[in-house]
DNA sequence: CTACATGCAAAGGGTTTGCACGACA
DNA sequence: TGTCGTGCAAACCCTTTGCATGTAG
């Protein structure tokens, strides 16, 4: 299972036009970093991309990889899985459950919604392997932050 | 919305018996750290707990908070939200979608399961505020790792 | 009394930044 | 040619660890 070369090239062309639009220079490094992530089905971290790129551009530095990935993120060409520099949060409840997170204040609250659990056995899920756990994470503006916003609006 | 004092005390007693069982010493610091996390509905990080505890135990150090939290985790008294020291993973697909993660090798793959979309309109979800986005994360043993395990078994 | 827990400070690992040099447009 | 990007090294932040002292059992 690999990404089709034609798909990769289409993505690269998309990057080129987006970069042009944004006034971002198309350096050799940026093109290779984009080509690398566009051709992968896993979700690599910066270090993994760095090692792959080094084969083609031996002198490249890790910080250029980071800088480029955040540029691609800002251009909405890639997404992130996991937040940068986030500390571990501890949950008083050790039983499996789901969460609600406020996009503004970051508060995390427990969600007890048993109806989610029936989706754990979804056949689509087992494409890649066995399913041992299942987490749903909802995000939005919490009531407190929502009130704060509307107060400002007055 | 707060945790009932009786619930907190029941949890503290549970901790005491678990600690005794495990041969873990019940220090003042450990009891206060446990009481703090047991009485909270949010999911604090170590620093947040540290600041609350310092009011009661001014001389406590942050590393004791960390060490205690991981002990509580090992005793299955608390859980974590987010993994410790995990690096950011970059996702070539910027559109909202879901993920499958292998618990052994850590590979992350995209899941396209439209049936998950009804979670967004679940009434249980809006208890805390508006729902703007949601993520489903399935985890298990991927096919590759599963094959590797059964090979060892022969 | 003795093993284990604590506090301190320093190290670790992933990520970011300041600066001078280098290269795209 | 001028501005922006790169590589290098050092800084940063959260977290962990080594070590001497303190304390629960």
Image (cartoon, coloured by chain):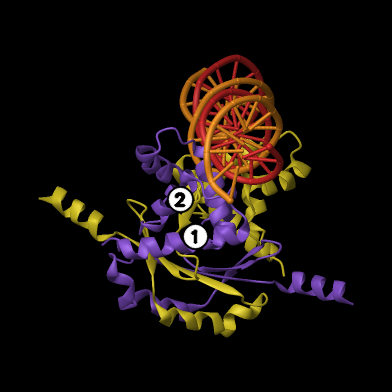
Chain colours: A purple, B yellow, C orange, D red
Q: Which residue is mark 1?
A: A15
Q: Is residue B55 left or right of residue A62?
A: right
Front residue of A14/A143: it is A14
Q: Is residue A63 visible?
A: no
Discs 1, 2 touching: Cβ within 8 Å: yes
Q: Position of residue A116 (x, y in %)?
A: 46, 78
The residue indicated by pointer 2 is: A31
Instruction: Determine the residue located farthest toward the left in the rendered image.
Output: B154
Is the residue B51 above or below the residue A124 in the image? Answer: above
Q: Residue at x 63, y 50 (%)?
A: B45
C-alpha gap between disc 1 and disc 2? 8 Å
Crowd tier of the residue under label 2, counting other residues whose Cα lies within 10 Å: few below 14, some 14–19, many 20 or above: some
Q: Is residue B143 rendered to the left or right of residue A97?
A: left
Residue A120 visible in the snapshot = yes
Q: Residues within 10 Å of mark 1 (few under 14, many from 20)?
A: many
In the rendered image, residue D21, in percent from the top left (x then y), is placed at 65, 18
Q: Quadrant of the C terminus of chain A?
A: bottom right
> B60 or A14: which is nearer to us?
A14
* Residue B38, x across and y down, in percent: 62, 57
């Amino acid at each position: 299972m690999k990404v089709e070369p034609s798909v990769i090239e289409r993505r690269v062309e998309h990057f080129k036009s987006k970069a042009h639009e944004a006034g971002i220079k198309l350096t050799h490094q940026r093109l290779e970093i984009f080509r690398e992530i566009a051709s992968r089905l896993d979700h690599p971290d910066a270090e993994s991309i760095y090692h792959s790129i080094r084969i083609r551009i031996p002198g490249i530095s890790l910080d250029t990889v980071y800088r480029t990935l955040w540029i691609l993120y800002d251009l909405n060409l890639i997404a992130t899985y996991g937040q940068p520099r986030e500390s571990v949060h501890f949950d008083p409840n050790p039983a499996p459950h789901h969460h609600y997170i406020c996009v503004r204040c970051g508060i995390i609250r427990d969600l007890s919604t048993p109806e989610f659990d029936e989706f754990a056995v979804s056949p689509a899920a087992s494409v890649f392997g066995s399913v041992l756990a299942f987490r749903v994470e909802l995000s939005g503006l919490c009531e407190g932050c929502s009130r704060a916003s509307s107060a400002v609006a007055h």
